């Protein structure tokens, strides 16, 4: 099987032009956007700059605070919570030319399920999910002829 040189880079496997939202979007709106459109991650941008990522898991779990009476606040989708209130702000990113090995190491180390992909001007051009990494792993097994069954 012939293998392309760039086949083992982030750019080959990423989803291009991912859905983005603003930090002022209501959590309820983001929840339904994900559910209706089938997304598990939305990249948060403000003034064309990456400011965070929100996952479907962020929308399903409460932010356990010091106030025991407020533990379930984020389960209430009828409130005025905005994405900025729940998004991950310390986002790890990759570039399209980065190796899948580098991306995989970041996903495992930081326990993220997706990494935004930035171009040389730091603009969001894609997203690499754990599902994308699994597809690449499947391809690697096909290319090498390896099997997990012995």
Image: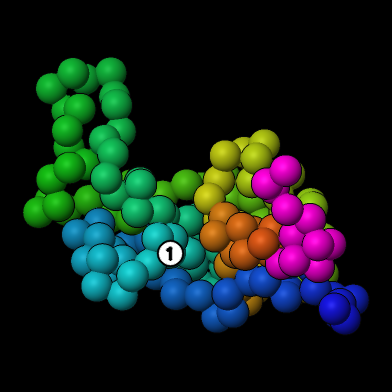
Q: What residue is shown at x 26% (from left), y 35% (from top)?
A: 62
Q: What is the basis of the colouring in this image?
A: rainbow
Question: Residue 59 at what x, y percent from top left?
Answer: 29, 49
**Segment tinted magenta in the rendering:** 139-150
Q: Nearer the viewer, residue 150 or 7?
A: 150
Q: Is residue 126 left or right of residue 67?
A: right
- Can you name the residue that lies furthest to the left here? 78
Label 1 sits on residue: 42
Question: Residue 119 at what x, y percent from top left?
Answer: 73, 74
Residue 127 shown in magenta: no
In the rendered image, the vertical position of residue 129 relative to residue 3, given as above or below: above
Q: Is the N terminus in the top left, top right, bottom left or bottom right quadrant?
A: bottom right
Q: What residue is shown at x 35% (from left), y 47% (from top)?
A: 57
Report whether residue 133 is seen. Answer: yes
Residue 143 shown in magenta: yes
Q: What residue is shown at x 17% (from left), y 28% (from top)?
A: 70
Q: Residues within 10 Å of mark 1 (few under 14, many from 20)?
A: many
Q: What residue is shown at x 35% (from left), y 46% (from top)?
A: 58
Circle 1: element type: strand
Which corner quadrant of the image does residue 99 belong to? bottom right
Q: Is residue 146 left or right of residue 93?
A: right
Q: Is residue 88 left or right of residue 114?
A: left
Report whether residue 116 is seen. Answer: no
In the rendered image, the vertical position of residue 61 relative to residue 145, given as above or below: above
């Amino acid at each position: 099987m012939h293998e392309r040189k760039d086949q083992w880079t982030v750019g080959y496997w990423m989803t291009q032009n991912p859905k983005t939202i603003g930090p002022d979007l209501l959590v309820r709106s983001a929840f339904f956007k994900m559910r209706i459109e089938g997304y598990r991650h939305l990249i948060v941008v403000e003034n064309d700059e990456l400011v965070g990522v929100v996952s479907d898991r962020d929308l399903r779990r409460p932010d356990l605070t010091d106030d025991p009476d407020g533990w379930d606040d984020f389960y209430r989708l009828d409130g005025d919570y905005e994405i900025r209130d729940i998004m991950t702000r310390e986002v790890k990113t990759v570039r399209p030319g980065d190796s899948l090995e580098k991306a995989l190491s970041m996903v495992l180390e930081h326990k993220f399920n997706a990494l935004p992909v930035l171009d040389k001007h730091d603009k969001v051009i894609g997203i690499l999910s754990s599902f994308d990494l699994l597809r690449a792993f499947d391809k690697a097994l096909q290319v090498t002829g390896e099997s997990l069954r012995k």
